[in-house]
Amino acid sequence: MSGDRDQLLESCLAAFIQAGTLDLSLDLLAKKVGSSKRMLIHYFGSRENLEVMVMGRLEERLRDRFRVGSFPAGTPLRAVVTALWEQTTSLESRGVLRLIMDVTRRGWSGSARAKRFYKEQQRLWIELLKEFQPDPAAVEALLQLFQGAVLAYLVTGNREPGRRALVGMTKDPPVDENIQR
Amino acid sequence: MSGDRDQLLESCLAAFIQAGTLDLSLDLLAKKVGSSKRMLIHYFGSRENLEVMVMGRLEERLRDRFRVGSFPAGTPLRAVVTALWEQTTSLESRGVLRLIMDVTRRGWSGSARAKRFYKEQQRLWIELLKEFQPDPAAVEALLQLFQGAVLAYLVTGNREPGRRALVGMTKDPPVDENIQR
DNA sequence: CTGTTGATGTACCACCTGGTACACCGGCCA
DNA sequence: TGGCCGGTGTACCAGGTGGTACATCAACAG
């Protein structure tokens, strides 16, 4: 039955999130989820496959969390962005954030799967932000700033510089204050 | 004699740069630099110490490369930033860039040494940029954008989005009357 | 009842990791 | 000459890695 496997997958994702990285040995992972390396291999075939499935599950979860419609239409861009910032840098999100950055690193280290993950995240955010900022170039820039801010936050633990920069960038709608959707 | 050690350290740094990460086993590293694990331990005492020394050496090298005075006073901010971007994302710099990001990751994974490295890099860039952008908040934001752009560039290999965003952020000098800080 | 099937534990494997023990060798000093 | 001393190779170690072989056990089908 695949229910067992599904539940196990969920536990694994939770363990990876808690660890903030995919670099967790099967033995350790098994201990964390109350199973055994034997069973992990049994259900997922190989470590690589397990990683792929975990990434997929994480992708789903993020897709649910950041789907278009999370914010009411007409919300000012600044409010959307600061809300996203608060949520992203909340203490409970630190694990997911680190895990995502870990996958991102695998992306620039060559993993095709990880690259796809990254691109999908980008797409998701663009999809979300373009509802509140019609200028694609501005969205693109905002996204990069957000990523840089996350990076700085992760290392320093300080949310303020990121917030300041994001607020600064969304201060005035660059051309007109009329937001239509 | 410490000359041997110094030369070996240089070779190690080169190997780490080529690998784009510090996660290189002593055996592999030894092969790359034409030595042996035995000798690496002999000269550096332990792997950890070797890593620390490599980080130090990398820090020195970056300090030389990005010291204040790299650009003539009065250069427009946009020119400075785009020049830095071209240089940073050039193909030859990819290894260093990845290595730096690897160290950064160690920073957010808890390594105190790596955190210091990150902060020193920040300081360096602030020192450099504040000559061309007197507003500290703007420098802070610019730096975060730069980091995010680097991240996106590393994963996608595309330099253009980063360049566009950086140019956009340095478009009109904020001395204009319509932007108040 | 018997046979098959899937879940599970234990023991094991080869390989890689940082690091060490020890022997050897060449050059330098007395 | 002799002896010491730093550089070096080889073999080795314990611990960890992903993964497998095999046996066991329960449930379910015939």
Image (cartoon, coloured by chain):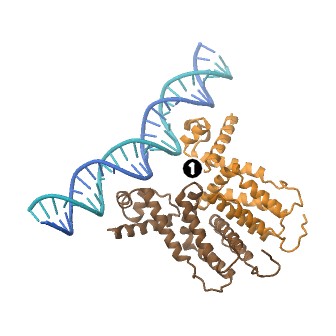
Chain colours: A orange, B brown, C blue, D cyan
Q: Nearer the viewer, residue D16 or B111?
A: B111
- Where is the N terminus of chain B found, in terms of image quarters? bottom left
Number of numbered callouts drawn: 1
Can residue B89 be seen in the rendering of this structure? no
| Left or right: B101 as drawn, with respect to C24 | right
User: Does residue B143 sit above or below C24 in this rendering?
Assistant: below
User: Does residue A7 sit above or below B88 in this rendering?
Assistant: above
User: In percent of the image, x 42 and y 63: which residue is there?
Assistant: B32
User: In percent of the image, x 61 and y 75: which residue is there?
Assistant: B127
- Where is the C terminus of chain B found, in terms of image quarters? bottom right
| Left or right: B90 as drawn, with respect to A150 | left
Horizontal and vertical percent position of residue B62: 53, 72
Can residue A117 be seen in the rendering of this structure? yes
Q: Nearer the viewer, residue B118 or A39?
A: B118
Q: Nearer the viewer, residue D6 or D11?
A: D6
Residue A136 found in image quarter: bottom right
Specify few, some or many for label 1: CA neighbours under 10 Å numbering under 14, 14-19, or 20 or more.
few
Residue at label 1? A23
User: In percent of the image, x 91 and y 66: which residue is there?
Assistant: A180
| Left or right: B134 as drawn, with respect to C23 | right
Horizontal and vertical percent position of residue A65: 77, 51
Q: Nearer the viewer, residue A150 or B176?
A: B176
Kindly identify the amino acid type of the residue bearing the numbered disc 1. Asp
Horizontal and vertical percent position of residue A157: 65, 57
Residue B130 found in image quarter: bottom right
Horizontal and vertical percent position of residue A75: 87, 60
Which chain does the residue under circle 1 lie in? Answer: A
Which SS class for mark 1? loop
Residue B40 found in image quarter: bottom left
